[in-house]
Image (cartoon, rainbow, N blue to C red):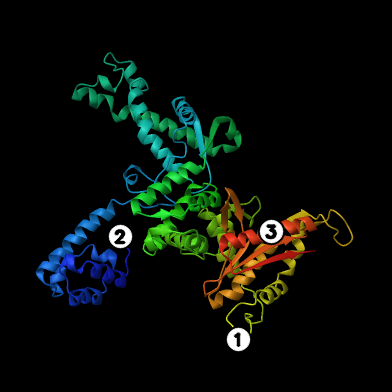
């Protein structure tokens, strides 16, 4: 794919094809010095290249190459996240109807339409509601409308020349009379007046009594797999086993988030993969940062990306019942917020420098954890027993069945402070690595990637009894084995 290549990548692309294009090093250097990127390369013609003193034959070859690749890349499918896919978009974008194959649901919808019911299609933002309706309109509604248009225009029922259906039109006069604007103006006006009256006197209506609600479902696992299998085939790309399942698990099948994952892979990984293989390690390590980049690109951010209100307006957060409260729609968004938003909004960190072993570049993880725990926000930990708690199975302050903070509270604080402490030295702090072993889904808590390719796995547990600790230690060792970790620590917290 040429579109999107940088200057240096265009140079490398041409060097690999120098014999085919009859180019010399000087010709390639001229193009590089003209600051030609991939998107502009596709628009140049032979005259442009000749103006730069590139000989006629290579100039013509370059023009033909650009023409062919532009035609090829224009028909190549891509991902669209937060806008309606209309009929003209279907051939160039990845698309899946969430109720495809569910005839009963489709039939129920069209029955309500034919009965002229008020219908409310509801679902989360960017979940494909408008696209689904556009598909229905194009595939079914207009066909039904044309079949029954004659019987629904009462203006012609009083006429001796009334036609039963569109199939009876065989003269120009019939067509002009059949589709006269006069018959539609009255119906359109009546519909607008009815909706306007409901809006102006909304307090007089029980909306649920006059509107049929239909929920727009999320994708299921098979639909997500079908979308990414098509993406793999189009791009001669292979996903390592478990990645597609992880996308489904982490997004809950939400259409916008699934497509956002596709956009992140398309924009950030396609040109960087060795042997066209997306490994679990690359995906787990970079999915959150790539998704944030995709959000910025797709949403055309002009406001502070750390604003919870902005993220809610774009469907990344779900507004809560109280002002200023928000819900996270999926595990993936939870980690996006924990890793890219909260550390920037709350940038506190230990005053101490990053602890390394003496005369070494190896992180002293125990000391780093000690610094981090001392920097925990005391109010967050204190109020957690009222906001995010579990019942302790051990004595707490000499009492049983006391509320204590859940592991997620320590997890969030640990991730925030470790990221603020270590990121300045190019350490990467990620969490919730999705591991599949013996068909079981497992999730490690926090993984630290050092600048030297080493992995440190942190497994957390809060206020545990002895048998739970034994199981937890074994789980930490299992995670370390699955991740090929260099160091494993089990961190337990007690109130």
Looking at the rendered image, the quarter that the N terminus falls into is: bottom left
Question: Which comes sooner in the sequence, label 2 or label 3?
Answer: 2
Horizontal side of 324 relative to 167 (left or right) equals right
Quote the CA–CA distance across marks 2 and 3: 46 Å
Q: Residues within 10 Å of mark 1 (few under 14, many from 20)?
A: few
User: Label 1's element?
Assistant: loop
Using the image as rendered, state which of residue 445 and residue 34 is in the foreground.
445
Q: What residue lies at 59% left-to-right and 61% top-to-bottom?
A: 481
The mark that comes first in sequence, 2 or 1, is 2
Residue annotated with mark 2: 1
Residue holding disc 3: 474
Q: Where residue 53 sits: x, y (%)? A: 13, 75
Image coordinates of residue 30 in percent, x first then y, are 20, 76
Q: Is residue 452 above or below residue 251?
A: below
Q: Is residue 279 above or below residue 450?
A: above
Going by the image, does 60 lie left or right of 359? left
CB contact under 8 Å: marks 2 and 3: no
Q: Are marks 3 and 1 in contact (CB under 8 Å)?
A: no
Residue 216: % across, % down: 51, 39
Residue 359, disc: 1
């Amino acid at each position: 794919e040429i579109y999107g290549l940088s200057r240096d990548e265009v140079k490398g692309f041409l060097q690999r094809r120098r014999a085919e294009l009859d180019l010399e090093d000087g010709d390639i250097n001229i193009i590089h010095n003209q600051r030609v990127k991939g998107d502009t390369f596709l628009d140049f013609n032979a005259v442009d290249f000749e103006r730069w003193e590139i000989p006629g034959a290579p100039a013509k070859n370059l023009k033909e190459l650009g023409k062919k690749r532009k035609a090829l890349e224009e028909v190549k499918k891509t991902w669209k996240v937060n806008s309606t896919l209309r009929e003209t978009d279907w051939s160039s974008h990845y698309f899946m109807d969430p109720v495809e194959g569910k005839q009963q649901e489709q039939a129920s919808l069209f029955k309500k339409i034919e009965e002229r019911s008020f219908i409310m299609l509801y679902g989360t933002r960017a979940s494909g509601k408008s696209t689904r309706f556009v598909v229905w309109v194009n595939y079914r509604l207009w066909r039904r409308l044309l079949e029954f248009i004659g019987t629904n225009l009462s203006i012609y029922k009083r006429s001796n020349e009334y036609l039963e259906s569109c199939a009876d039109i065989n003269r120009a006069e019939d067509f002009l009379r059949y589709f006269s604007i006069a018959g539609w103006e009255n119906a359109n006006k009546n519909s607008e007046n009815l909706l306007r009256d409901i809006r102006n006197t909304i307090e007089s209506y029980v909306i649920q009594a006059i509107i049929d609600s239909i929920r727009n479902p999320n994708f299921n696992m098979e639909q997500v797999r079908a979308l990414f299998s098509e993406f793999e085939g189009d791009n001669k790309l292979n996903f390592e086993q478990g990645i597609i399942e992880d996308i489904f698990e982490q997004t809950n099948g939400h259409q916008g988030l699934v497509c956002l994952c596709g956009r992140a892979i398309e924009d950030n990984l396609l040109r960087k993969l060795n042997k066209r293989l997306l490994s679990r390690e690359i995906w787990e390590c970079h999915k959150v940062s790539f998704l944030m980049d995709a959000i910025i690109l797709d949403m055309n951010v002009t406001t502070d990306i750390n604003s919870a209100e902005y993220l809610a307006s774009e469907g990344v957060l779900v507004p809560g019942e109280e002002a200023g409260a928000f819900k996270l729609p999926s595990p993936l968004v939870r980690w996006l917020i924990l890793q890219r938003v909260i550390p920037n909004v709350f940038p506190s960190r230990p005053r101490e420098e990053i602890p390394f072993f003496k005369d070494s570049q190896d992180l002293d993880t125990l000391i780093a954890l000690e610094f981090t725990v001392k920097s925990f926000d005391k109010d967050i930990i204190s109020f957690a027993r009222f906001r995010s708690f579990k019942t302790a199975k051990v004595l707490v302050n000499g009492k049983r069945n006391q509320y204590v903070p859940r592991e997620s509270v320590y997890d969030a604080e640990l991730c925030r402070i470790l990221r603020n402490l270590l990121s300045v030295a190019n350490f990467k702090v990620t969490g919730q690595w999705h591991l599949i072993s013996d068909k079981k889904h497992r999730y490690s808590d926090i993984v630290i990637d050092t600048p030297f390719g080493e992995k440190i796995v942190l497994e957390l547990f809060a206020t545990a009894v002895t048998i739970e600790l034994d199981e937890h230690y074994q789980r930490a060792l299992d995670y370390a084995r699955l991740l090929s970790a260099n160091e494993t620590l089990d961190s337990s917290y007690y109130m």
